[in-house]
Image: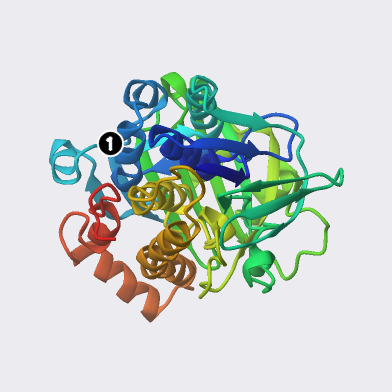
Amino acid sequence: MRFGIVGGGIGGLTSALVMARRGHDVAVFERSSAIREVGAGVQISPNAGCVLRSLGLGDAFDAISVHPERMVFRRWEDDSIIRANDFDEAFADQYGMPLASVARTDLIEILAQAVAAVPTINVSLASRVTHVEPGDDSSTIFFADATSLSFDVVIGADGIHSVVRPCVGGADSARFSGSVAYRALVPLDAVKDLPVDFTNRVGPDRHVVSYFIGKDRRYLNLVCISPEDSWTTESWTEPGTLDDLRERFAGWSPELLSILDRVEEPVFRWALYDREPLEQWGIGSTTLLGDACHPMLPFMAQGSCQAIEDAAILGRCLDDVHAGDGPDGAAAVAALRRYETARQGRTARVQTTSFMNRDLFHMPDGPMQQGRDEFLASGVAGFGPLEWVYSYDPLTAAI
């Protein structure tokens, strides 16, 4: 069959590889003039890492990965540890592989290289899609230059501001969370004294996540979440300033302030948006994938992982669909609805939990915060609260 994929990010490229390995012809349409990723770092937990390995990317993925030694929650004012869990051999044994921190640019690079090596995948850059017309036998992609192309299946993997989503009934607007993320990097030479941890410093109305990324652990990635009353600029990301970042976290622990003093500019400021879970992901032979259908706040580090899971499940649902002498519209449409049904419950739970984590992380000091800290300190051993996330295997999960 012929697949048209709108969007050349992590989800789009992964789904292209998944479909090509099953013998399908794939065309990817990316609006940017180059395959690139925005943002600095991303966590790839075992539930998504297993998919990359299944696509033959294991060695390349290992080469770009940093494996944190611990997950640590710290208190905002003194850096005292609320809870710490080891990412040790027992974790890798339980979930099949370690958790990895990677630079988004590195991950996009290995995906793009893998895509370029497959003759049945064609990537078109600077392709501005205006809309999609879903149909049962085929769906048609329309472009800004007044041309159009039809495919047996169209996948909208074009992110939270998707142009495909409204074409399948998702007319809702993205929801501003009331928070912005200041994203910054610190070169390794300036932070060699720090442990290789995934650290979450939590405090009233804000929190800071830090972890190493890049080949040879070349940067410490900082994501500093702070409240914002509104977002009125046209773009969802804009340049920030180091002075503003420091001001927003004045009074926090000396350890954090010392790290902020070592930040290498530029600093970027991102508006954090999500949407309510979407009941309908597709019409006819068009469906959605990744942030196009389930954009989520980054408070579970699962956005990219859920897009990768989507690609694996979608491929499996289409395993029994073959083009033969022509498009098998009914079978393809049924397979897309089966994919959507298999994914909607899990992705909605991740979306909802990510939204709830904002309040959990941002509790003001007081009795509720003390109860939260006591729960985290004495709660379920190991990674119990995240068991349902990490143990999911999209290569074998029921569909």
From what the image shows, is residue 372 above or below residue 133?
below
Three-letter amino acid code at the position of disc 1 = Glu
Q: Which residue is mark 1?
A: 69
| 242 on left or right of 386 | right
Residue at x 50% of width, y 51% of height: 208
**Quadrant showing the C terminus:** bottom left
Residue 270: x and y in percent read: 67, 52
From what the image shows, is residue 375 above or below residue 119?
below
- Compare residues 238 and 10 and report the one nearer the observer: 10
Residue 99: x and y in percent read: 31, 40
Residue at x 33% of width, y 21% of height: 59
From what the image shows, is residue 358 above or below residue 332?
below
Residue 222 visible to an observer of this rendering: no
Residue 367 visible to an observer of this rendering: yes
Residue most toward the bottom? 367
Residue at x 19% of width, y 66% of height: 379
Neighbourhood count class around disc 1 (C-alpha, 10 Å): few under 14, some 14–19, many 20 upward: some
- Compare residues 259 and 375 and report the one nearer the observer: 375
Determine which quarter of the picture holds residue 161: bottom right
Determine which quarter of the picture holds residue 61: top left
Judged from the image, the secondary structure of the residue bearing numbered disc 1 is: loop
| 197 on left or right of 297 | left
Residue 335: x and y in percent read: 40, 59
- Compare residues 16 and 302 and report the one nearer the observer: 16
